[in-house]
Amino acid sequence: MGCFYSKKSKRKSGGKEDPALTTSVDDAGNTVPLGNNIDEAPKQYSWDKREKVDPKDYMLTGLRDVTVGRLSGKLNGQQFVIQECENCNIYVFDHSATITIDDCVNCRIFLGPVKGSVFFRDCKDIKCVVACQQFRTRDCKKLEVFLCCATQPIIESSTGMKFGCFQYFYPELAFHFKDAGLSIFNNNWSNIHDFTPVSGENNWSLLPEDSSVLDFVPAPDPESEFKSIRISTDPSRSIVPLTKGGRRKGSEE
C-alpha cells in the first residue's frame, strides 16, 4: 500500500509537466514558452514615461477683456491655439511650433518665435507683433502687423491689412529665435502676396516708417503675470534689424 502523501512516479506520467503551466498562446495562435518568473513586472516603454499633457495649457478660448498668455518655458516648442477672444491683450513670451488664431476681435497680440506657421482666420481689428517661418491670413479685416517672416507672407480674402517691420526685445528672445530655427536676418515682412487681389483696390499697405509698436501692442499690464518681463520696442534694441521694406505702397492707400 502506498503512502497517501507520496508523489506520483514520473515513470508513470512520463516525467512531463502540464503544458498549460509552461506555455502560452500569442495573438497569432502560436504556442510560446512562459518565463521562469510568472510575476515579472511588465516592461516600461518611453511613451509610458511621457509627462501627461493637458490640451488646455496650449489654447486660449472664449476670453474677453483680459490680459493673458504664456511665459517662457510654458509652450517650449508646442502648438498653440487662440480662438474666440475679444478685446484681450495676449502675450506669448515663448517659442512654439505653430499658432492658429481664429475668430478673434479687437485684440492686441505678441507672439514669440514660431518655427512653422502663424495662421489668422476670420479675425477683425487685430494689432500684433509676430515672428514666424510662414505667415498667412484668410477672411480677415483690419490687421496691423509688425512682422518677421522667413518666407513670403500670404493674405487671402483679407482687406485693410497693414504691415511693419518686427521691433521687439525681451531677455530670452534671442534664444527663442534659435530654438525656433529662425534667422533674425531673413525677414520678408513687406513682400506680401495677395492670393485674392481685387482689380482697382489695395488689400494691403505698409505702416508708416515711424510707427511705434507700443501704440499698437502695449506693454503688459503691471498687475499681470507678465509684469517681470523686461521688454523694449526701441529699434536700437530690437533682436531683428529694422528695415524699410519695399515701400511700394503708401500707408494711406
Image (cartoon, rainbow, N blue to C red):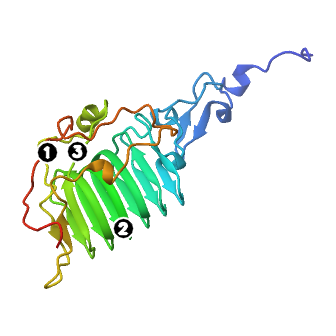
For badge 2, the amino acid type reads Arg
Give the residue number, with chain letter if any, for mark 1: 242
- Number of marks in the rendered image: 3
Give the residue number, with chain letter if any, for mark 2: 121
For badge 1, the amino acid type reads Leu
Secondary structure of residue under mark 2: strand
Residue in the image at 25% along x and 73% along y: 156
Residue in the image at 41% along x and 64% along y: 102
User: With respect to residue 233, does 2 lie above or below?
Assistant: above
- Which mark is nearer the camera, 1 or 2? 1
Q: Quadrant of residue 108?
A: bottom left
Of the image marks 1 and 2, the number of the one nearer the N terminus: 2
Q: Which mark is residue 167?
A: 3
Residue 121 screen position, x and y as percent? 36, 67
Instruction: Please report contact status of discs 1 and 2: CB closer than 8 Å, yes or no.
Output: no
User: With respect to residue 42, does 93 lie above or below?
Assistant: below
